[in-house]
Amino acid sequence: MNISRLFFFNIFFSLLFSCETKSQNVNNSYLSKKEKFHTKLTKYVKAPQVYEDLVNTRDVLKIEYPSNGMKLQALILRKNIDSTKRKPILVFLHGGFALGEQDVLGCEVFTKLGYIVFAPSYRGENGNGGNFELFLGEVDDAKESIKWIAKQPFADSTKIYVFGHSIGGGISSLLSLEQDVPITKSGSSGGSYSHDFYGWEDIIPYDKKDFLEGKMRVLEENIHSMQIDHYAFVGTKDEALYDRKKELDAKSNNTKLKIIYIEGDHFTSLEASMKEFIKIINSERK
């Protein structure tokens, strides 16, 4: 075989292998799997938390946003809303399994610096339609809520940031895997979950023996499919998470997942985490 033919075949097989590898990467991506995946719920229930009805108050405005044929409730802090000027948005994803006014009132860290704070509830929560899915349909609802807020006349759709606490942190982290969502960066406090959801056996609404069901509901099983940077804050006294420090550090190495350790437990680390996150996003805006 002459040199020119050998060169041709080397290039051909190199390109063929490259195309196969890229195809495999696409086929193995989180979004391609999610498109084919359909959860099989073993029970159809509402979110496992008592809630108070959401209402308009002096501080918050109750709205509804559309998601998957449902109208779901959300709250917007009235502070900083100006119909004549578009402002940056902080989408706050609440902890627990119900949204309350106190969730958004605790976001002064962001409103003090001019952000408009918006907080959605999800299917199965707060009297909404739909069923509790535990980090699946709720992520789709969060995504639709962000698309809704981005279209509002007071929102700067180029400056939308997401931050979640606990359950909301898990949802925020999963949003980093999605495309076609106008998020610049996302962050979480105490929201790094493993696929087995150990200790939650009573509320898991699917067959917990099905590994794929759990895998599709956590970021750490899909890190290499991340679309944007996610800053995951972990309290040094949050034993459930900090005990997994070596594991989290290993999985996040050289990825878009940034693990940041901060003083405090699952709850006392929240405010400090929000302050650090706003430093990160404000440095980007300058």
Image (cartoon, grey):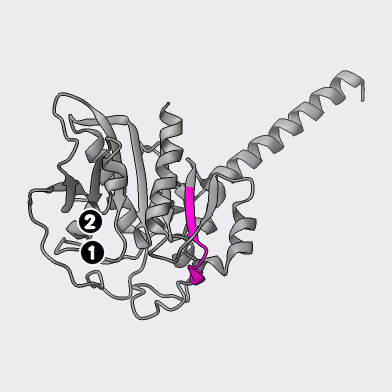
If the image is split into quadrants, where does the C terminus sit?
Answer: top left
Above or below for 186 versus 39: above
- Furthest toward the bottom, the residue is 202
Task: Calculate the distance from the C-alpha at mark 1 to the C-alpha at mark 2.
Answer: 7 Å
The residue nearer to you, when weighing 258 against 195, is 258
Q: At numbered mark 1, what does the secondary structure look like: helix, strand or loop?
A: loop
Quarter location, residue 281: top left
Task: Determine which residue is flagged by label 1.
Answer: 98
Image x and y of residue 34, in percent: 43, 53
**Looking at the image, do the residues carrying marks 1 and 2 touch, with CB atoms under 8 Å apart?**
yes
Q: Residue at horizontal 39%, vertical 49%?
A: 274
The residue nearer to you, when weighing 253 against 110, is 110
Is residue 232 magenta-colored? yes
Earlier-in-chain disc, 1 versus 2? 1
Question: On the rendered structure, is 14 left or right of 61?
Answer: right
The residue nearer to you, when weighing 123 against 62, is 62
Is residue 214 magenta-colored? no
If the image is split into quadrants, where does the N terminus sit?
Answer: top right
Q: Residue at horizontal 37%, vertical 72%?
A: 206
Q: Residues within 10 Å of mark 2 (few under 14, many from 20)?
A: many
Find the magenta span and give its range: 231-240
Image x and y of residue 74, in percent: 18, 51
The residue nearer to you, when weighing 194 against 264, is 264
Residue 174 visible here: no
Above or below for 234 versus 229: below
Task: Determine which residue is flagged by label 2.
Answer: 121
Question: On the rendered structure, is 64 left or right of 135?
Answer: left
Residue type at mark 2: give it: Ser
Above or below for 139 versus 81: below
Q: At numbered mark 2, what does the secondary structure look like: helix, strand or loop?
A: loop
Residue 22 visible here: yes
Image x and y of residue 204, in percent: 36, 74
